[in-house]
Image (cartoon, helix red, strand yellow):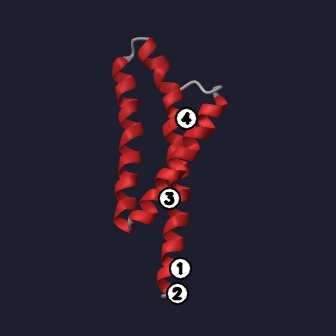
Amino acid sequence: MNNTVSLTAAHLALGFAVGTLAGAWHFTSLRWNGPLFAEGRAATALALQLARFAPTGALLLTLAHFGAPALLAGMAGILLARAIAMRGHGGRP
């Protein structure tokens, strides 16, 4: 049982850390994406959208293979990064 608890704790820590980093990338790159659409550079903006969503989706899929605790911890990390990004913009997306 002790090994199971250690493994679950490791999955939680890994999921949270990687989720936080992925969320930071995801929401930081969102700041760059809006102006690209506004400038009419749709192809570049769509490429950046893909560069935002693909790694985030791949990360969540990978964490799901480690189990629900890792996936939920990863989502918690992404939500933490979102809250930090929103606070940095005064609550505006």
3D distance between C-alphas at marks 3 and 4: 20 Å
Whichever of callouts 4 and 2 sits on the residue coming sooner in the sequence is 2
The front one of 16 and 40 is 16
Kindly state the secondary structure of the residue where label 4 is placed: helix
Residue 90, position as x, y percentages in the image: 65, 25
Q: Residue 63, relative to residue 93: is it above or below?
A: below
As shown in the figure, which amino acid type bears the numbered disc 4? Thr
Q: Residue 88, relative to residue 55: is it above or below?
A: above
Q: Mark on residue 2?
A: 2
Whichever of callouts 3 and 4 sits on the residue coming sooner in the sequence is 4
Q: Mark on residue 26?
A: none
Kindly indicate whether the residue at mark 2 contacts the one at mark 1 (C-beta within 8 angstroms): yes
For disc 1, the marked residue is 6
Kindly state the secondary structure of the residue where label 2 is placed: helix
Whichever of callouts 4 and 1 sits on the residue coming sooner in the sequence is 1
Whichever of callouts 1 and 3 sits on the residue coming sooner in the sequence is 1
Between circles 4 and 2, the one closer to the viewer is 2
Residue 7, position as x, y percentages in the image: 49, 77
